[in-house]
Protein backbone atom coordinates (compact mmCIF):
# COMPACT_ATOMS: atom_id res chain seq x y z
CA UNK A 1 0.00 0.00 0.00
CA UNK A 2 1.35 3.40 -1.01
CA UNK A 3 2.04 5.91 1.74
CA UNK A 4 0.17 9.20 1.36
CA UNK A 5 2.46 12.22 1.33
CA UNK A 6 2.11 14.42 4.38
CA UNK A 7 1.12 17.55 2.44
CA UNK A 8 -1.51 15.65 0.47
CA UNK A 9 -2.84 14.01 3.62
CA UNK A 10 -3.14 17.42 5.29
CA UNK A 11 -5.03 19.02 2.38
CA UNK A 12 -7.18 15.94 1.86
CA UNK A 13 -8.15 15.85 5.54
CA UNK A 14 -9.00 19.54 5.44
CA UNK A 15 -11.29 19.02 2.45
CA UNK A 16 -12.98 16.06 4.18
CA UNK A 17 -13.77 18.30 7.13
CA UNK A 18 -15.16 20.97 4.81
CA UNK A 19 -17.39 18.35 3.17
CA UNK A 20 -18.52 17.15 6.62
CA UNK A 21 -17.18 13.62 6.19
CA UNK A 22 -17.60 11.82 9.51
CA UNK A 23 -14.53 10.81 11.52
CA UNK A 24 -15.25 7.12 10.90
CA UNK A 25 -15.54 7.63 7.15
CA UNK A 26 -12.36 9.75 7.08
CA UNK A 27 -10.33 6.68 8.07
CA UNK A 28 -11.95 4.69 5.25
CA UNK A 29 -11.41 7.53 2.75
CA UNK A 30 -7.70 7.61 3.56
CA UNK A 31 -7.53 3.84 3.15
CA UNK A 32 -9.20 3.96 -0.29
CA UNK A 33 -6.95 6.82 -1.36
CA UNK A 34 -3.91 4.78 -0.40
CA UNK A 35 -5.25 1.81 -2.37
CA UNK A 36 -5.92 4.06 -5.35
CA UNK A 37 -2.40 5.53 -5.35
CA UNK A 38 -0.97 2.04 -5.10
CA UNK A 39 -3.17 0.89 -8.00
CA UNK A 40 -2.07 3.77 -10.23
CA UNK A 41 1.60 3.11 -9.42
CA UNK A 42 1.34 -0.63 -10.04
CA UNK A 43 -0.62 -0.42 -13.33
CA UNK A 44 0.94 2.82 -14.67
CA UNK A 45 -2.18 4.97 -14.49
CA UNK A 46 -2.08 8.71 -13.96
CA UNK A 47 -3.36 9.40 -10.45
CA UNK A 48 -4.49 12.91 -11.43
CA UNK A 49 -6.61 11.69 -14.37
CA UNK A 50 -10.21 10.80 -13.61
CA UNK A 51 -10.03 8.14 -16.35
CA UNK A 52 -8.14 6.05 -13.81
CA UNK A 53 -11.20 5.83 -11.61
CA UNK A 54 -13.19 3.40 -13.75
CA UNK A 55 -10.46 0.70 -13.97
CA UNK A 56 -9.83 1.16 -10.24
CA UNK A 57 -13.48 0.42 -9.47
CA UNK A 58 -13.34 -2.56 -11.83
CA UNK A 59 -10.38 -3.86 -9.86
CA UNK A 60 -12.39 -3.56 -6.65
CA UNK A 61 -15.17 -5.60 -8.26
CA UNK A 62 -12.64 -8.31 -9.11
CA UNK A 63 -11.56 -8.27 -5.46
CA UNK A 64 -15.24 -8.92 -4.57
CA UNK A 65 -15.67 -5.64 -2.72
CA UNK A 66 -19.30 -4.82 -1.93
CA UNK A 67 -21.24 -2.15 -3.79
CA UNK A 68 -21.20 0.06 -0.69
CA UNK A 69 -17.40 -0.23 -0.52
CA UNK A 70 -17.11 0.58 -4.22
CA UNK A 71 -19.27 3.68 -3.80
CA UNK A 72 -17.24 4.78 -0.79
CA UNK A 73 -13.99 4.27 -2.71
CA UNK A 74 -15.38 6.26 -5.65
CA UNK A 75 -16.31 9.16 -3.36
CA UNK A 76 -12.88 9.07 -1.75
CA UNK A 77 -11.04 9.20 -5.09
CA UNK A 78 -13.28 11.96 -6.46
CA UNK A 79 -12.51 13.98 -3.35
CA UNK A 80 -8.83 13.39 -4.05
CA UNK A 81 -9.25 14.86 -7.55
CA UNK A 82 -10.71 18.00 -5.99
CA UNK A 83 -7.80 18.14 -3.53
CA UNK A 84 -5.02 17.54 -6.04
CA UNK A 85 -6.35 19.83 -8.72
CA UNK A 86 -7.22 22.65 -6.35
CA UNK A 87 -3.56 22.62 -5.33
CA UNK A 88 -2.70 23.30 -8.97
CA UNK A 89 -5.25 26.09 -9.18
CA UNK A 90 -7.63 24.65 -11.79
CA UNK A 91 -10.64 22.39 -12.10
CA UNK A 92 -10.91 18.83 -13.42
CA UNK A 93 -11.15 18.88 -17.17
CA UNK A 94 -12.49 16.32 -19.57
CA UNK A 95 -10.56 15.02 -22.55
CA UNK A 96 -13.56 15.54 -24.82
CA UNK A 97 -15.75 18.57 -25.27
CA UNK A 98 -19.40 18.66 -24.26
CA UNK A 99 -21.68 18.77 -27.33
CA UNK A 100 -22.96 22.28 -26.84
CA UNK A 101 -25.16 21.97 -29.93
CA UNK A 102 -27.58 20.02 -27.76
CA UNK A 103 -28.30 23.13 -25.70
CA UNK A 104 -30.55 25.72 -27.29
CA UNK A 105 -29.24 29.24 -27.44
CA UNK A 106 -25.87 28.27 -26.02
CA UNK A 107 -23.50 30.36 -28.14
CA UNK A 108 -19.79 29.89 -27.62
CA UNK A 109 -17.89 32.75 -26.12
CA UNK A 110 -14.22 33.46 -26.66
CA UNK A 111 -13.51 32.12 -23.20
CA UNK A 112 -15.25 28.84 -24.07
CA UNK A 113 -13.45 28.50 -27.39
CA UNK A 114 -10.09 28.90 -25.66
CA UNK A 115 -10.90 26.46 -22.85
CA UNK A 116 -8.08 23.94 -22.25
CA UNK A 117 -8.36 20.40 -23.67
CA UNK A 118 -11.34 21.45 -25.76
CA UNK A 119 -13.54 21.63 -22.67
CA UNK A 120 -16.21 24.20 -23.45
CA UNK A 121 -17.54 25.53 -20.18
CA UNK A 122 -20.65 27.56 -19.79
CA UNK A 123 -19.85 31.09 -18.68
CA UNK A 124 -22.02 30.74 -15.57
CA UNK A 125 -20.67 27.36 -14.48
CA UNK A 126 -17.61 26.92 -12.29
CA UNK A 127 -17.12 23.26 -13.19
CA UNK A 128 -18.99 20.29 -14.56
CA UNK A 129 -19.54 17.37 -12.17
CA UNK A 130 -17.54 14.19 -12.35
CA UNK A 131 -20.68 12.20 -13.14
CA UNK A 132 -21.11 14.07 -16.43
CA UNK A 133 -17.44 13.84 -17.34
CA UNK A 134 -17.47 10.10 -16.67
CA UNK A 135 -20.52 9.72 -18.92
CA UNK A 136 -18.79 11.59 -21.73
CA UNK A 137 -15.58 9.59 -21.37
CA UNK A 138 -17.49 6.31 -21.49
CA UNK A 139 -19.72 7.08 -24.49
CA UNK A 140 -17.64 9.57 -26.40
CA UNK A 141 -18.63 13.01 -27.61
CA UNK A 142 -20.68 11.76 -30.58
CA UNK A 143 -22.74 9.37 -28.45
CA UNK A 144 -23.66 11.86 -25.73
CA UNK A 145 -27.12 13.18 -26.56
CA UNK A 146 -29.39 15.65 -24.90
CA UNK A 147 -31.32 12.73 -23.39
CA UNK A 148 -28.11 11.35 -21.84
CA UNK A 149 -27.32 14.69 -20.25
CA UNK A 150 -30.87 15.10 -18.92
CA UNK A 151 -30.76 11.64 -17.29
CA UNK A 152 -27.95 12.67 -14.96
CA UNK A 153 -29.49 15.96 -14.00
CA UNK A 154 -28.78 18.41 -16.87
CA UNK A 155 -31.47 20.03 -19.01
CA UNK A 156 -31.86 23.20 -21.01
CA UNK A 157 -32.41 25.20 -17.83
CA UNK A 158 -29.77 23.63 -15.62
CA UNK A 159 -27.19 23.70 -18.40
CA UNK A 160 -26.96 27.44 -18.00
CA UNK A 161 -27.47 27.49 -14.23
CA UNK A 162 -24.67 27.65 -11.73
CA UNK A 163 -23.46 24.12 -10.93
CA UNK A 164 -20.47 22.97 -8.94
CA UNK A 165 -21.29 25.49 -6.20
CA UNK A 166 -19.75 25.06 -2.78
CA UNK A 167 -22.28 24.02 -0.13
CA UNK A 168 -19.94 24.44 2.84
CA UNK A 169 -21.95 27.37 4.21
CA UNK A 170 -25.16 25.33 3.86
CA UNK A 171 -23.81 22.51 6.00
CA UNK A 172 -22.54 25.01 8.54
CA UNK A 173 -26.04 26.51 8.76
CA UNK A 174 -27.59 23.05 9.14
CA UNK A 175 -25.23 22.35 12.02
CA UNK A 176 -26.13 25.65 13.70
CA UNK A 177 -29.89 25.32 13.18
CA UNK A 178 -29.99 21.75 14.52
CA UNK A 179 -28.02 22.71 17.63
CA UNK A 180 -30.20 25.78 18.11
CA UNK A 181 -33.25 23.50 18.32
CA UNK A 182 -31.43 21.01 20.59
CA UNK A 183 -31.97 18.12 18.20
CA UNK A 184 -29.93 14.98 18.77
CA UNK A 185 -26.60 14.24 17.09
CA UNK A 186 -28.26 11.37 15.23
CA UNK A 187 -30.76 13.79 13.71
CA UNK A 188 -27.91 16.07 12.66
CA UNK A 189 -26.05 13.14 11.10
CA UNK A 190 -29.12 11.99 9.15
CA UNK A 191 -29.96 15.50 7.92
CA UNK A 192 -26.39 16.03 6.73
CA UNK A 193 -26.44 12.70 4.91
CA UNK A 194 -29.62 13.44 2.99
CA UNK A 195 -28.57 16.98 2.12
CA UNK A 196 -25.27 15.56 0.79
CA UNK A 197 -27.23 13.10 -1.37
CA UNK A 198 -29.48 15.93 -2.54
CA UNK A 199 -26.44 18.04 -3.38
CA UNK A 200 -25.00 15.19 -5.43
CA UNK A 201 -28.33 14.64 -7.21
CA UNK A 202 -28.61 18.30 -8.18
CA UNK A 203 -24.94 18.36 -9.24
CA UNK A 204 -24.08 20.97 -6.59
CA UNK A 205 -26.64 23.38 -7.97
CA UNK A 206 -26.60 26.86 -6.50
CA UNK A 207 -28.76 26.77 -3.32
CA UNK A 208 -30.44 30.02 -4.34
CA UNK A 209 -31.84 28.34 -7.47
CA UNK A 210 -33.20 25.23 -5.72
CA UNK A 211 -36.94 24.73 -6.02
CA UNK A 212 -39.72 22.29 -5.20
CA UNK A 213 -39.18 20.71 -8.61
CA UNK A 214 -35.74 19.52 -7.50
CA UNK A 215 -37.27 17.99 -4.38
CA UNK A 216 -39.96 16.18 -6.42
CA UNK A 217 -37.38 14.75 -8.80
CA UNK A 218 -35.15 13.62 -5.94
CA UNK A 219 -37.94 11.91 -3.97
CA UNK A 220 -39.21 10.21 -7.14
CA UNK A 221 -35.66 9.10 -7.92
CA UNK A 222 -35.39 7.49 -4.47
CA UNK A 223 -38.64 5.56 -4.93
CA UNK A 224 -38.26 4.54 -8.59
CA UNK A 225 -34.53 4.16 -9.18
CA UNK A 226 -33.29 3.31 -5.69
CA UNK A 227 -36.38 1.43 -4.49
CA UNK A 228 -36.10 2.76 -0.94
CA UNK A 229 -38.63 2.00 1.78
CA UNK A 230 -41.43 4.45 2.55
CA UNK A 231 -39.86 5.39 5.88
CA UNK A 232 -36.56 6.17 4.12
CA UNK A 233 -38.30 8.41 1.61
CA UNK A 234 -40.13 10.21 4.42
CA UNK A 235 -36.85 10.69 6.25
CA UNK A 236 -35.36 12.31 3.14
CA UNK A 237 -38.46 14.52 2.81
CA UNK A 238 -38.15 15.74 6.42
CA UNK A 239 -34.45 16.52 5.93
CA UNK A 240 -35.16 18.59 2.80
CA UNK A 241 -38.09 20.29 4.52
CA UNK A 242 -35.71 21.35 7.29
CA UNK A 243 -33.20 22.54 4.68
CA UNK A 244 -35.69 24.73 2.84
CA UNK A 245 -37.50 26.19 5.84
CA UNK A 246 -34.72 26.75 8.36
CA UNK A 247 -31.57 27.07 6.24
CA UNK A 248 -32.59 28.47 2.85
CA UNK A 249 -35.55 30.43 4.26
CA UNK A 250 -37.79 29.36 1.38
CA UNK A 251 -41.42 28.31 1.24
CA UNK A 252 -41.32 24.58 0.62
CA UNK A 253 -44.67 24.68 -1.14
CA UNK A 254 -46.96 21.77 -1.91
CA UNK A 255 -45.12 18.72 -3.22
CA UNK A 256 -47.47 16.97 -5.66
CA UNK A 257 -46.78 14.33 -8.27
CA UNK A 258 -44.15 12.48 -6.25
CA UNK A 259 -44.00 8.71 -6.66
CA UNK A 260 -44.35 7.41 -3.11
CA UNK A 261 -42.55 4.33 -1.91
CA UNK A 262 -44.94 1.54 -0.95
CA UNK A 263 -45.41 1.15 2.79
CA UNK A 264 -45.31 -2.45 3.93
CA UNK A 265 -47.16 -3.86 6.93
CA UNK A 266 -44.72 -4.91 9.62
CA UNK A 267 -45.61 -7.74 12.00
CA UNK A 268 -43.52 -7.37 15.17
CA UNK A 269 -41.58 -10.30 16.60
CA UNK A 270 -43.02 -11.62 19.87
CA UNK A 271 -40.88 -13.62 22.28
CA UNK A 272 -42.23 -16.16 24.73
CA UNK A 273 -41.34 -16.05 28.43
CA UNK A 274 -39.06 -19.08 27.97
CA UNK A 275 -37.22 -17.42 25.05
CA UNK A 276 -36.61 -14.22 27.03
CA UNK A 277 -35.27 -16.18 30.01
CA UNK A 278 -33.02 -18.16 27.66
CA UNK A 279 -31.60 -14.94 26.22
CA UNK A 280 -30.97 -13.51 29.70
CA UNK A 281 -29.17 -16.69 30.76
CA UNK A 282 -26.70 -16.35 27.88
CA UNK A 283 -25.92 -12.68 28.54
CA UNK A 284 -22.87 -11.63 30.56
CA UNK A 285 -22.73 -8.62 32.91
CA UNK A 286 -23.29 -5.75 32.39
CA UNK A 287 -25.29 -6.53 29.23
CA UNK A 288 -27.62 -8.80 31.18
CA UNK A 289 -28.61 -5.95 33.49
CA UNK A 290 -29.05 -3.62 30.50
CA UNK A 291 -31.47 -6.13 28.94
CA UNK A 292 -33.42 -6.35 32.20
CA UNK A 293 -33.74 -2.55 32.27
CA UNK A 294 -35.00 -2.59 28.71
CA UNK A 295 -37.49 -5.34 29.43
CA UNK A 296 -38.56 -4.33 32.94
CA UNK A 297 -38.64 -0.53 32.52
CA UNK A 298 -39.53 -0.17 28.83
CA UNK A 299 -36.51 2.03 28.09
CA UNK A 300 -35.05 2.72 24.71
CA UNK A 301 -31.50 1.52 24.31
CA UNK A 302 -29.90 4.99 24.25
CA UNK A 303 -32.00 6.03 27.28
CA UNK A 304 -30.74 3.05 29.24
CA UNK A 305 -27.07 3.49 28.35
CA UNK A 306 -27.14 7.19 29.25
CA UNK A 307 -28.47 6.63 32.78
CA UNK A 308 -26.40 8.12 35.60
CA UNK A 309 -26.30 6.86 39.16
CA UNK A 310 -28.14 9.87 40.59
CA UNK A 311 -31.17 9.07 38.43
CA UNK A 312 -31.96 5.96 40.52
CA UNK A 313 -34.32 6.48 43.46
CA UNK A 314 -34.56 3.23 45.44
CA UNK A 315 -36.67 4.87 48.18
CA UNK A 316 -39.45 5.77 45.75
CA UNK A 317 -38.71 2.75 43.55
CA UNK A 318 -38.39 4.80 40.35
CA UNK A 319 -35.73 6.01 37.97
CA UNK A 320 -35.79 9.29 36.05
CA UNK A 321 -35.06 9.37 32.33
CA UNK A 322 -33.60 12.75 31.35
CA UNK A 323 -33.53 13.99 27.76
CA UNK A 324 -35.37 11.01 26.29
CA UNK A 325 -36.78 11.04 22.80
CA UNK A 326 -37.94 14.57 22.00
CA UNK A 327 -35.85 15.89 24.92
CA UNK A 328 -38.61 14.87 27.34
CA UNK A 329 -38.10 13.68 30.93
CA UNK A 330 -40.15 10.94 32.55
CA UNK A 331 -40.07 8.56 35.53
CA UNK A 332 -40.54 4.78 35.33
CA UNK A 333 -40.79 2.18 38.12
CA UNK A 334 -37.80 -0.02 38.95
CA UNK A 335 -38.74 -3.74 39.01
CA UNK A 336 -38.23 -5.13 42.53
CA UNK A 337 -36.74 -8.32 41.07
CA UNK A 338 -33.61 -6.50 39.87
CA UNK A 339 -33.06 -4.09 42.80
CA UNK A 340 -30.50 -6.33 44.53
CA UNK A 341 -28.66 -6.89 41.25
CA UNK A 342 -28.52 -3.13 40.65
CA UNK A 343 -27.08 -2.48 44.13
CA UNK A 344 -24.40 -5.14 43.58
CA UNK A 345 -23.57 -3.51 40.26
CA UNK A 346 -23.26 -0.09 41.95
CA UNK A 347 -20.73 -1.49 44.45
CA UNK A 348 -18.49 -2.55 41.57
CA UNK A 349 -18.86 0.94 40.10
CA UNK A 350 -17.57 2.48 43.33
CA UNK A 351 -14.39 0.41 43.04
CA UNK A 352 -14.01 1.41 39.40
CA UNK A 353 -14.54 5.08 40.30
CA UNK A 354 -11.82 4.97 43.00
CA UNK A 355 -9.47 3.31 40.54
CA UNK A 356 -10.14 6.03 37.96
CA UNK A 357 -9.46 8.81 40.47
CA UNK A 358 -6.07 7.27 41.29
CA UNK A 359 -5.31 7.30 37.56
CA UNK A 360 -5.62 11.12 37.35
CA UNK A 361 -9.12 10.74 35.95
CA UNK A 362 -10.76 13.93 34.57
CA UNK A 363 -14.32 12.65 34.96
CA UNK A 364 -17.20 11.52 32.80
CA UNK A 365 -18.49 13.35 29.75
CA UNK A 366 -21.23 15.83 30.64
CA UNK A 367 -23.85 17.31 28.36
CA UNK A 368 -23.66 20.83 26.91
CA UNK A 369 -21.98 23.35 29.22
CA UNK A 370 -22.94 21.55 32.41
CA UNK A 371 -19.31 21.14 33.42
CA UNK A 372 -18.81 24.92 33.31
CA UNK A 373 -21.72 25.33 35.69
CA UNK A 374 -20.61 22.48 37.98
CA UNK A 375 -16.81 22.14 37.58
CA UNK A 376 -16.49 19.25 40.07
CA UNK A 377 -19.50 17.27 38.88
CA UNK A 378 -17.60 15.17 36.32
CA UNK A 379 -15.57 13.48 39.09
CA UNK A 380 -18.40 13.08 41.59
CA UNK A 381 -19.81 9.57 42.00
CA UNK A 382 -23.53 10.42 41.50
CA UNK A 383 -22.71 11.77 38.01
CA UNK A 384 -20.98 8.57 36.86
CA UNK A 385 -22.59 6.35 34.24
CA UNK A 386 -24.69 3.41 35.41
CA UNK A 387 -23.21 1.44 32.49
CA UNK A 388 -19.71 2.85 31.86
CA UNK A 389 -17.46 1.87 28.98
CA UNK A 390 -14.74 -0.66 29.70
CA UNK A 391 -11.89 1.72 28.82
CA UNK A 392 -11.12 5.37 29.33
CA UNK A 393 -11.11 7.74 26.36
CA UNK A 394 -8.32 10.27 25.85
CA UNK A 395 -9.27 13.67 24.42
CA UNK A 396 -6.55 14.57 21.85
CA UNK A 397 -6.86 18.33 22.37
CA UNK A 398 -6.46 18.36 26.16
CA UNK A 399 -4.84 14.93 26.74
CA UNK A 400 -7.46 14.30 29.44
CA UNK A 401 -8.71 10.82 30.26
CA UNK A 402 -12.48 10.59 30.51
CA UNK A 403 -15.03 7.79 30.56
CA UNK A 404 -17.92 7.36 28.16
CA UNK A 405 -20.95 5.12 28.64
CA UNK A 406 -21.27 1.64 27.13
CA UNK A 407 -21.55 1.80 23.36
CA UNK A 408 -24.77 0.69 21.69
CA UNK A 409 -23.02 -1.83 19.46
CA UNK A 410 -21.64 -3.67 22.51
CA UNK A 411 -25.18 -4.43 23.65
CA UNK A 412 -26.44 -5.25 20.16
CA UNK A 413 -23.63 -7.73 19.50
CA UNK A 414 -24.09 -9.29 22.94
CA UNK A 415 -27.79 -9.93 22.25
CA UNK A 416 -27.00 -11.44 18.87
CA UNK A 417 -24.54 -13.87 20.49
CA UNK A 418 -27.07 -14.71 23.21
CA UNK A 419 -29.78 -15.41 20.62
CA UNK A 420 -27.44 -17.70 18.67
CA UNK A 421 -26.31 -19.52 21.81
CA UNK A 422 -29.91 -19.92 23.00
CA UNK A 423 -30.86 -21.52 19.67
CA UNK A 424 -33.73 -19.10 18.98
CA UNK A 425 -34.63 -19.14 15.29
CA UNK A 426 -35.79 -15.56 15.00
CA UNK A 427 -34.12 -12.59 13.35
CA UNK A 428 -31.46 -11.43 15.80
CA UNK A 429 -31.51 -7.86 14.48
CA UNK A 430 -35.11 -7.48 15.74
CA UNK A 431 -34.75 -9.27 19.08
CA UNK A 432 -33.77 -6.10 20.96
CA UNK A 433 -36.73 -4.25 19.49
CA UNK A 434 -39.01 -7.15 20.45
CA UNK A 435 -37.83 -7.02 24.07
CA UNK A 436 -38.51 -3.27 24.32
CA UNK A 437 -41.85 -3.65 22.52
CA UNK A 438 -43.06 -6.31 24.97
CA UNK A 439 -41.92 -4.17 27.88
CA UNK A 440 -43.92 -1.23 26.51
CA UNK A 441 -47.12 -3.22 26.32
Image (cartoon, helix red, strand yellow):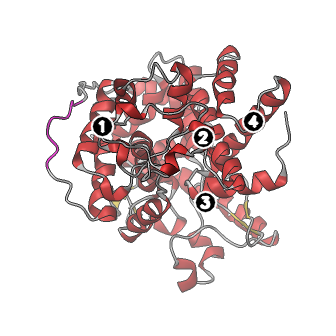
| 10 Å crowding of disc 2: few (<14), some (14-19), many (20+) | many
Residue 440 is at least partly visible in this image: no
Residue 86 relative to residue 294: left or right: right
Outermost residue to the front = 110
Which residue is under mark 1?
Answer: 104
Kindly identify the residue that appears in the image at 44 percent across and 31 percent down: 99
Helix, strand, or loop for circle 4? loop
Instruction: State if disc 4 and disc 1 touch (CB < 8 Å).
Output: no
Q: Calculate the distance from the C-alpha at mark 1 to the C-alpha at mark 2.
A: 23 Å
Q: Specify the segment rendered in magenta.
A: 254-260
Which residue is under mark 2?
Answer: 93
1 or 2: mark nearer the eye: 1
* Residue 345 in which image quadrant: bottom right
3 or 1: mark nearer the eye: 1
Helix, strand, or loop for circle 2? loop
* Residue 188 in which image quadrant: bottom left
Which residue is under mark 4?
Answer: 47
Earlier residue among tags 2 and 4: 4
In this rendering, the answer to whether 230 lies above or below 337 is: above
1 or 4: mark nearer the eye: 1
Which residue is under mark 3?
Answer: 346
Residue 437, image x, y percentages: 33, 37
Amino acid sequence: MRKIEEELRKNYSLLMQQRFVSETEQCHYLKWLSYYLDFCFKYSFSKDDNKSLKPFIEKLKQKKQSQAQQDQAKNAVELFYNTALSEKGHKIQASKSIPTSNFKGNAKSEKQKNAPNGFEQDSNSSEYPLELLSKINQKGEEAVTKQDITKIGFNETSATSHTGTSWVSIFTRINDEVKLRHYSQKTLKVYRLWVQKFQSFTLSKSPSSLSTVDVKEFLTFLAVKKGVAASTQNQAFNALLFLFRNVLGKDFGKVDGVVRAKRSLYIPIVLSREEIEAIFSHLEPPCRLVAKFLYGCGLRLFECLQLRLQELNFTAGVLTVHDGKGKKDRTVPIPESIVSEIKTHIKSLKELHQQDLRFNYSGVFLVSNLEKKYPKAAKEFPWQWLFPAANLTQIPATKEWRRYHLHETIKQKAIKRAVDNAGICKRASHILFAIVLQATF
